[in-house]
Amino acid sequence: MPKIDEKLEPILAQVQRRNAGEAEFHQAVTEVLESLGRVVAKRPDYLDHALIERICEPERQIIFRVPWVDDGGDVRINRGFRVQFNSALGPYKGGLRFHPSVNIGIIKFLGFEQIFKNALTGLPIGGGKGGSDFDPKGRSDGEIMRFCQSYMTELHRHLGEYTDVPAGDIGVGGREIGYLFGQYKRLTNRYEAGVLTGKGLVYGGSRARTEATGYGAVYFVERMLGTRGTEFAGKRAVVSGSGNVAIYTIEKIQELGGKVVACSDSGGYVVDEDGIDLELLKDIKEVRRERISEYAARQSRAHFIDSGSIWDVPCDIAMPSATQNELTGGDARKLIANGVIAVGEGANMPSTPEAVRLFQEAGILFGPGKAANAGGVATSALEMQQNASRDSWTFEQTERRLAEIMRGIHDICAATAEEYGKPGDYVLGANIAGFVRVAEAMRAFGVI
Ligand code: NDP
Ligand code: 2IT
């Protein structure tokens, strides 16, 4: 394991003590602090004025009650969160996650990662994240709408196009953003399009935002493959999850001539040796909101497997695109034994620290989420740009910007890793390049 520099150890110890029990937040902070040892060795001035301690402490954390009425007339209570982590580079920006596992530690890990990810895009956005322990599975449209309205009734006072701009994440897509935007507009009496991103195209959304995270992750991996003189064409890929990120990851891999042979949801995974039938997958997941097992029920050549791990399926390229810590050390060993050459994280922190270490030790190209999946939030920033100028760009124009931004992120991660003495270490490169941008802005503001 990389060691934490002794000057940074007290910072980690303090984070652990003050945020007891928040395992995912500790994990995310540990990884960044492991990278920063090389920075403070070169630039000890970054230790001044408690700069790093301040980056580890959210600027504001909002926790609130979300009462709503279910279809049976019963009152339900969920907990709402918004962690406004860092606004040095722009308004807080980051998604909302609705999933029963959500707690403050998960929102803080996501918000913390978002600071560096957003900095890497080079666009003017700070870092934040929010959500609720609400479980959308099995809920009617009416229940989803009433939940979103109640959630926004509290949250709206903390948002604004210059303050905090949420978007989607797990369990929050176009339908939810519509209900949230409608309630924000009604409560504030303002048509403030730039207050949320991931909006529908008829009311201020950006073309290519739906596709952006998946497409961007594939562009990132394509660029990593290029450093070894290879490409997606003819490669076998496995993509976990079957939500927004996974679907558009699969679409772009197929466009580039790769074959995706497996995808999943929390109930298990499907293997389709002829390549995932994307139209069928979209119909099951985007239109009908059904389980992935339905894929094998409707496509006779495919198999549904509800035991073991999707990472047992041999592949050249693995793109974990479901959730945190879904790819363990054991999974990494299996992937390496099966000859994987590249791993690109579509999800946030999907590989455990042991898995990351194993991939790096084996010399496998490894693109961490905060770099590889930054295309989603980057395109959100492009949506804000279109809203601010009351403009609407074409799909091609937006995708071209996305592709450029992903190339830029890849290249700054690679150049920074080289500059700090670990060429090819995209984890180090992403953490340091993101940190330096945020730290420089914070330093300019003085102690705030
Ligand atoms: P969706 O809700 O659209 O899809 C999530 C997918 O992951 C579903 O297939 C879901 O299965 C699966 N999944 C979620 N939680 C778990 C779990 N605890 N165990 C197993 N499977 C799980 O979300 P997104 O596609 O938007 O998000 C996927 C990942 O990408 C997340 O890590 C998110 O933070 C990250 N991300 C998303 C971005 C975006 O723009 N949407 C941008 C950057 C990163 P099931 O339906 O069975 O729950
Ligand atoms: O994790 C992420 O980057 C997102 N869920 C997207 C955030 C955004 O504001 O578009």
Image (cartoon, grey):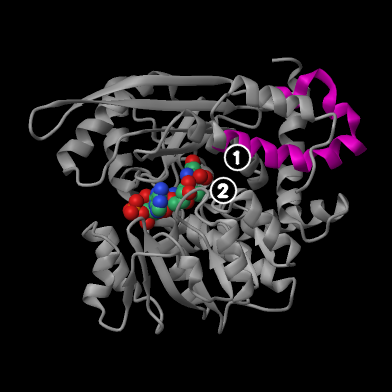
Distance, label 1 to label 2, CA atoms, is 9 Å
Callout 1: CB less than 8 Å from ligand 2? yes
Q: Residue at x 60, y 40 (%)?
A: 113
- Main SS, magenta region, reads helix
Around disc 2, counting alpha carbons within 10 Å, would you say few (fewer than 14), some (14 to 19), or many (20 or more)?
Answer: many
Q: Residue at x 25, y 46 (%)?
A: 137
**Looking at the picture, how far across and down is residue 385, in whole percent?**
52, 42
Judge left or right: residue 275 versus residue 91: left
Decide: is 325 above or below 98: below
Q: Quadrant of the C terminus?
A: top right
Q: What type is the residue that disc 2 sits on?
A: Met
Asked if residue 392 shows in the view, the reply is no
Q: Residue at x 59, y 65 (%)?
A: 219
**Looking at the picture, how far across and down is residue 296, in whole percent?**
27, 74
The span shown in magenta is 24-53
Q: Where is mark 1, residue-wise?
A: 113
Q: Residue at x 51, y 48 (%)?
A: 324
